[in-house]
Image (cartoon, grey):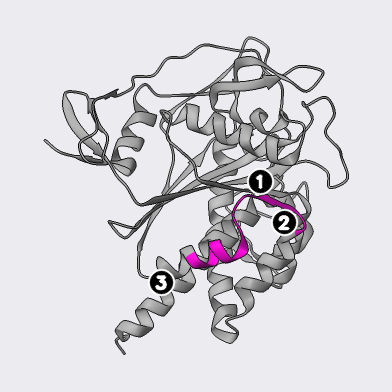
């Protein structure tokens, strides 16, 4: 039976609320970060011209673009840090092993998503032993959250690194969720059901390739955090597992929302104690309400190559122009 316009709007509204809440939570416990040496990399940037009206124009690859207005950007981070560990000297804030940028385009009624590989090399602001900024170094973007004297400074540093990677765009809001939230989300949902595409039976006998399981909290953590000892041990594989879990968690939340409209708020409340954010609960829900019928595009990633650095740790180098191409598609309108 066809759905009414109101039913379609209500479903899209639930989907967007769920998207924000789930993605804020699932990055809670991903992987073990490693320190790496700096490596310089230069990407092509657009050339800014005088603004016409309130829309900045840029030239990129011989074409003229106008910057879109009325965008809301939210960086979601999953932080690999124990709940009771404290920052010391501005360099122990934990690593942002899961990063996803959401861009809400109110003019075009569209939501774009970019999942960023935690091994991506980009300029990161670093702090000295006394907790003061001492310049920038080329390093994995996941390490950016480790620098800062407070959780808020940690988040702002990760935001700055992401802005550097993405051609200097502006990110309005951030939400960073610590490791304990992963269990809280999975527990609140009564377990998320997935079909395993990798073999994790050496970690848990029940987690064989092809098995369909309603994950326990411990199994969810294994699925999302494990990397080096699963498959080929790449972060690309782990990112794929994260997306599988996201889709399943969203489906489960949709089922729960049919039973109670209070589920989204309850989940936010359950995560709040493990979250650092500069967006309020009300603002987040308001953004979802305004965007209730927007098109939500699939999660995008940046093209590039993985390679082992001189120090033996993995690095991901974004392909030349890949970041700029994505930025121009999402943040600018082509004029000619």
In the rendered structure, the answer to whether residue 203 lies left or right of residue 14 reads right
Q: Which mark is residue 12?
A: 3
**Is 16 above or below relative to 261?**
above
Residue 8 x %, y %: 35, 79
The structure residue drawn at horizontal position 27% and vertical position 41%, both measured from the top left corner, is 54
Nearest the camera: 239 or 61?
A: 61
Count of numbered badges drawn on the protein: 3
Question: Residue at position x 34%, y 25% from top?
Answer: 321
The alpha-carbon separation of the residues under discs 2 and 3 comes to 25 Å
Q: Earlier in the sequence, mark 1 or mark 3?
A: 3
Is there a contact, CB below 8 Å, between mark 2 and mark 1? yes
From the viewer's perspective, is 155 left or right of 151? Answer: left
Q: Which residue is mark 2?
A: 182
- Residue placed at 63% from the left, 61% from the top? 211
Label 3 sits on a secondary structure element that is helix
Badge 1: residue crowd in 10 Å (few <14, some 14–19, many ≥20): many
Reading the image, the residue beneath label 1 is: 78
Q: Is residue 110 above or below residue 65?
A: below
Q: Secondary structure at mark 2?
A: helix
Q: Position of residue 66 (x, y in %)?
A: 23, 38
Q: x, y (%) of residue 324?
A: 35, 29
Magenta stretch: give its range. 273-286
On-image quarter of the C terminus: top left
Report which quarter residue 23 is drawn in.
Answer: bottom right
Residue 76 in magenta stretch: no
Q: In front: 196, or 161?
A: 161
């Amino acid at each position: 039976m066809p759905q009414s316009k109101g039913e379609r709007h209500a479903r899209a509204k639930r989907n967007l609320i769920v998207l924000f809440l789930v993605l804020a939570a699932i990055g809670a416990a991903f992987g073990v970060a490693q320190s790496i040496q700096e490596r310089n990399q230069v990407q092509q940037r657009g050339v800014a011209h005088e603004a016409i009206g309130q829309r900045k124009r840029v030239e990129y690859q011989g074409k003229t673009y106008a910057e879109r207005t009325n965008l809301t950007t939210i960086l979601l981070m999953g932080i690999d840090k124990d709940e009771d560990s404290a920052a010391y000297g501005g360099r122990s804030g934990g690593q942002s092993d899961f990063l996803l940028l959401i861009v809400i385009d109110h003019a075009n009624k569209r939501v774009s998503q970019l999942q960023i590989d935690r091994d991506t090399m980009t300029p990161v602001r670093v702090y000295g032993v006394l907790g003061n900024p001492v310049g920038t170094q080329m390093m994995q973007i996941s390490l950016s959250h480790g620098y800062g004297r407070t959780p808020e400074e940690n988040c702002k540093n990760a935001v700055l690194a992401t802005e550097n990677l993405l051609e200097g765009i502006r990110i309005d809001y951030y939400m960073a969720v610590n490791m304990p939230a992963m269990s809280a989300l999975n527990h609140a949902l009564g377990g998320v059901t997935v079909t395993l595409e990798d073999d994790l039976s050496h970690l848990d006998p029940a987690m064989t390739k092809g098995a369909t399981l309603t994950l326990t909290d411990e199994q969810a953590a294994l699925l999302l955090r494990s990397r080096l000892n699963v498959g080929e041990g790449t972060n690309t594989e782990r990112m794929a597992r994260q997306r599988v879990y996201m889709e399943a968690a969203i489906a489960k939340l949709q089922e729960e929302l049919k039973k109670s409209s209070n589920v989204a708020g309850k989940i936010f409340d359950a995560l709040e104690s493990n979250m650092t954010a500069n967006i309020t609960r009300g603002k987040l829900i308001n953004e979802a309400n305004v965007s209730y019928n927007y098109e939500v595009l699939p999660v995008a990633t940046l093209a590039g190559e993985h390679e082992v650095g001189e120090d033996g740790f993995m690095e991901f180098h974004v392909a030349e122009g890949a970041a700029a191409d994505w930025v121009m598609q999402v943040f600018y309108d082509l004029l000619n």
